Amino acid sequence: MTVHKTVWFAWCLHMFEFGDIRFRPVEKEDLKLLHQWENDFELIMYSRSKPMNFVNMTQLEKQYEEWVKDEKHFHFLVELVDSKMPIGVARIEQQSWGNVKTAELGTYIGKKELWGKGIGRQISVALLEMAFHQLNAERCEAWSVEYNIRAHKTLEECGFKKGGAVRQAAFVNGRKWNGLHFDILREEYLKMREALLKQSLGSKLETYLTKHCTIQGYPTDFK
Ligand SMILES: CC(C)(COP(=O)(O)OP(=O)(O)OC[C@H]1O[C@@H](n2cnc3c(N)ncnc32)[C@H](O)[C@@H]1OP(=O)(O)O)[C@@H](O)C(=O)NCCC(=O)NCCS
């Protein structure tokens, strides 16, 4: 009974809900699903420019053990709020190169039938919220390969600016491709935050503000 209570409490503590999606910790039971996603040629071709990604359960379990020990970075399982159906993963890696707090963001939607429906944008805005509004990052960055137009559009729609290219950094499907770097500064995000939240959350905006931006007795800094 006590154990159940503790597990339930920890579970609730690590939830982050944003519109239709929820971010929760990756659990051991999720590894079966990750096994499927991480071995998907097309998915990994887009997400990591490394389609020949053959990983077995033992390798995933080792990776999971590393995540469990890792207190600096966040590894999320993204699921739909209503059905609790897992749809993908996301990560926030905290760095402070040059004494500036930077969060490197990444995601993939493992359920490929959900690509192109605007969920990636919702995930990206949620990651920006966590990074800037909860983790106090000064800037966020993301990497993507030259041919991943869908990801570039998503990032740019969320305010990321395309920076430099790392030339011919990936060899995929018979040729070399550039790696592209995107970033967004805190002040740039704050200028577009209200519009982005309204656009991404619609009628669920109030729920989000109440749940993750308000402390009882104190006014929210957004409205
Ligand atoms: C990248 C990803 C997270 C984007 O999420 P998504 O929900 O599929 O994307 P969205 O529905 O928000 O669409 C983003 C934009 O791309 C456009 N788009 C959709 N499919 C496209 C395609 N095949 N080619 C070009 N653009 C496309 C959409 O129209 C939209 O632009 P718009 O708002 O101007 O219409 C998701 O597609 C994914 O997980 N892809 C595989 C892994 C990956 O690439 N991860 C990111 C690594 S940086």
Image (cartoon, rainbow, N blue to C red):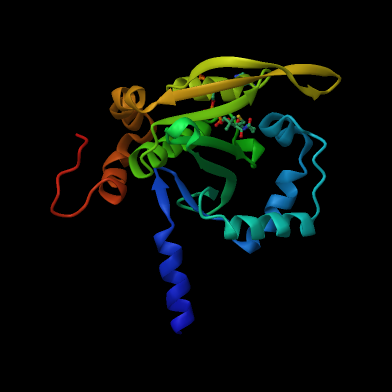
The residue that appears at 71% across and 45% down in the rendered structure is 37
Q: Quadrant of residue 205?
A: top left
Observer able to see residue 158: no
Which residue is at the front of the view, 79 or 173? Answer: 173
The residue that appears at 41% across and 39% down in the rendered structure is 131
Question: Residue 61, position in %: x, y?
Answer: 72, 59
Which residue is at the front of the view, 159 or 180? Answer: 180
The quadrant of the image that shows the C terminus is top left
- Residue 189, compared with residue 17, is above or below; it is above
Left or right: 172, with 68 as reference point: right
- Residue 123, compared with residue 62, is above or below; it is above
Question: Residue 80, position in %: x, y?
Answer: 50, 48
Left or right: 64, with 176 as reference point: left
Q: Quadrant of residue 18?
A: top left
- Residue 122, compared with residue 57, is above or below; it is above
Q: Quadrant of ligand 1?
A: top right
Which residue is at the front of the view, 195 or 90? Answer: 90
The residue that appears at 50% across and 33% down in the rendered structure is 97
Q: Quadrant of residue 28?
A: bottom right
The residue that appears at 27% across and 45% down in the rendered structure is 213
Question: Residue 10, position in %: x, y?
Answer: 44, 66
Left or right: 197, with 111 as reference point: left
